[in-house]
Amino acid sequence: MSTRNALLIVASVLTVASAVAVAAEGPNLGRVATPEEIALWDISIGPEGASLPAGSGTPKQGEAVYTAKCLACHGENGAGKPNDQLGTLPGDKPPVKTVGSFWPYATTIFDYVRRAMPYNESKTLTNDELYAVTAYLLQLNGIIGEKDMIDAKTLPKVRMPNRDGFVTFTRGK
């Protein structure tokens, strides 16, 4: 073996040993999140609504919240512009994908708004505001009535028009 090859092997071994030592020590970034910090982000709501918080709201209450915090992005009555249309407009042919024509579960509306809206201030709405905005969006789409109240018990029972419009995907079958 040549001296050059021997030096390359020694250099490679030292490089690997150094990398292992640094990796074992870690980059010293961050820390382990506390259970309380995790709880702030562990807010998923499934179709059955098991983790829905206390609170309630009506479409009328939701309209006030929508006007104050959603109108600038989603337009009058959820008609869209500059962002997505939220309400189904009569006569849309073909139908526009909106909350009412596409989403399979009403709990998904609550979950999405809770974690992502308003766009510039996500996670700032109270539970009552979330239920109210959800109720308003459901009413805009003709799914619930103007006087209906939404809460943790009633929201999972809302039957969305496209609930059966999805195909279950199973891997390997």
Image (cartoon, helix red, strand yellow):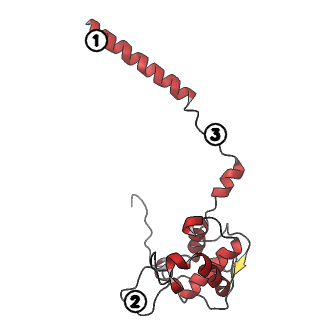
> Residue 92 has which mark?
2
Percent across and percent down for residue 127 are: 69, 71
Q: Are marks 3 and 1 in contact (CB under 8 Å)?
A: no
Disc on the earlier residue, 2 or 1? 1
Residue occupying the point 49% across, 24% down = 20
According to the picture, the residue beneath numbered tag 1 turns out to be: 5
Question: Viewer-proximal residue, 130 or 74?
Answer: 74
Helix, strand or loop under label 3: loop
Up the image or down, 59 lies above or below 18; here it is: below
**Quadrant hosting residue 63:** bottom right
**Is residue 7 shown to the viewer in this render?**
yes
Percent across and percent down for residue 43 are: 64, 61
Mark 2 burial class by Cα count in 10 Å: few <14, some 14-19, many 20+: few
> Residue 31 has which mark?
3
What whole-number distance in Å separates the C-alpha atoms at marks 2 and 1?
73 Å
Specify the amino acid type for callout 3.
Answer: Arg
Percent across and percent down for residue 12 are: 37, 18
